[in-house]
Amino acid sequence: MCGATRAGVSTDGVDLAAEAVIQGVVTREGEPVGTAYVRLLDSAGEFTAEAPTSATGQFRFFARPGAWTVRTLAPGADPVDRLVTAATGEVAELQISVG
Amino acid sequence: MSRSAVLVDADWVEAHLDDANVVLVEVDEDTAAYDKNHIRGAVRIDWKQDLQDQVRRDFVNKEQFESLLSQKGIGNDDTVVLYGGNNNWFAAYAYWYFKLYGHQDVKLLDGGRKKWELDSRELVPEIADRAATTYTASEQDRGIRAFRDEVEAAIGQKNLVDVRSPDEFAGRLLAPAHLPQEQAQRPGHIPTAANIPWSQAANDDGTFKSDGDLTTLYADKGVDLSKDTIAYCRIGERSAHTWFVLHEILGQPNVKNYDGSWTEWGSLVGVPIELGDS
């Protein structure tokens, strides 16, 4: 299964010391988008995991350390790609704005 | 089979939403997604509760499957259209399962729930009320289900396609990270298997790639399409997606899904295992 959960940005209950977290929020004109799909692609561009955003536009992945591309698909918008580096014990936060 | 016989698009579904003999069935990795909303009229099948024996490691038997479909209001002559999230992966598993028990007319909604949502099509929270039926299943079609002895005999003889992620194939991971899961005792892959992650068969929006792209995908990884093929993953659901591609879309005649998959193979005493990338 994919290493993604539908979750908020709060990291309560997550053992951050052991995880390389990539998370964020998807917005359109400042409002959260709860109907987006966020895809995690590895450094070769291969699909690894996908998460639907929560009602508050949030998503989270537990990744392996390294370089990733986060691709966001939302209704009526072009895909948005963001490069991000994940590291164990850290949370990479993304603010993703879709058109 | 061919693509047009096994896949329908969203326009087709919208045009047939009110057909009495068309039953939409949502089968999702996230079984709670249905509770939020779903395509109007759709019923839900829970892959874990409804399709697995709750004591033994096996599928529900013929009588249990008949009871499930009867209760869901699905008749033998109905057109069943399955859809779900994550590139239809559990919907494809359910498709294979319906074929295992002999349902004739079953299709996947190309792109599944994701494309439906990205297209901003209607989703409703109301639960469909379908009258119960008396469903009669066939005996399991063992022509599409492989067991461990057949898999061992296939090493070096048939195509073995391991559709897990490269890290699982190489033995660096036993499963995708950070989910509660069954753990095999040993990591790695079955010798001679080609590693072709299941998701490479789908576009970003969850629709299947073109026949040409799919054929190239498997051929480039050394799958000899003139030979019989067995696909496996960790618990047999991702490989059902690949079975769908090879058997239903590309029309390969002898393709089986090994649903025991890595959680069985990696726990067997004495079977060969390889480590490392392909």
Image (cartoon, coloured by chain):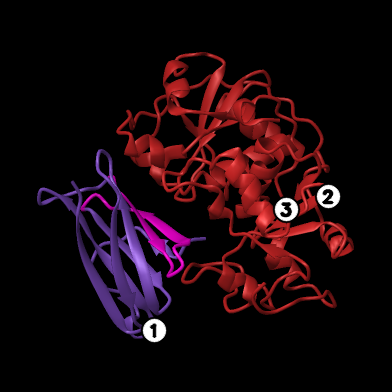
Nearest-to-viewer mark from 1 and 3: 1
Kindly tell me whether residue B50 is visible in this rendering: no
The answer to whether B101 is drawn above or below residue B258 in the figure is: above
Label 1 sits on what residue type? Answer: Ala
Q: Where is residue B137 in the image (x, y as percent from the top left)?
A: 75, 30
Query: Between marks 3 and 2, how big is the CA–CA gap?
Result: 28 Å
Q: Say which residue appears at 23% left-offset and 70% top-offset.
A: A93
Which contiguous range is marked in magenta?
A: A35-56
Chain red in the figure, letter: B
Q: Position of residue B227 (x, y in %)?
A: 83, 50
Q: Position of residue B278 (x, y in %)?
A: 67, 72
* Residue placed under numbered mark 1 in the picture: A18
Q: Give the chain of mark 2.
A: B
Label 3 sits on what residue type? Answer: Asp
Q: Position of residue A51 (x, y in %)?
A: 37, 56
For marks 3 and 2 on the same chain, the one whose residue lies earlier in the sequence: 3
Chain purple in the figure, letter: A
The answer to whether B26 is drawn above or below residue B200 in the figure is: above
Residue A45 falls inside the magenta stretch: yes
Residue B193 falls inside the magenta stretch: no
Q: Say which residue appears at 32% left-offset and 84% top-offset.
A: A89
Other residues around mark 3 within 10 Å, as few (<14) / some (14–19) / many (≥20): few
Q: Which of B173 and B78 is in front in this view?
A: B173
Q: Are marks 2 and 1 on the same chain?
A: no
* Residue placed under numbered mark 2 in the picture: B227
The answer to whether B28 is drawn above or below residue B148 in the figure is: above
* Residue placed under numbered mark 3 in the picture: B58
**The label number, if any, that marks residue B145 in the structure image:** none
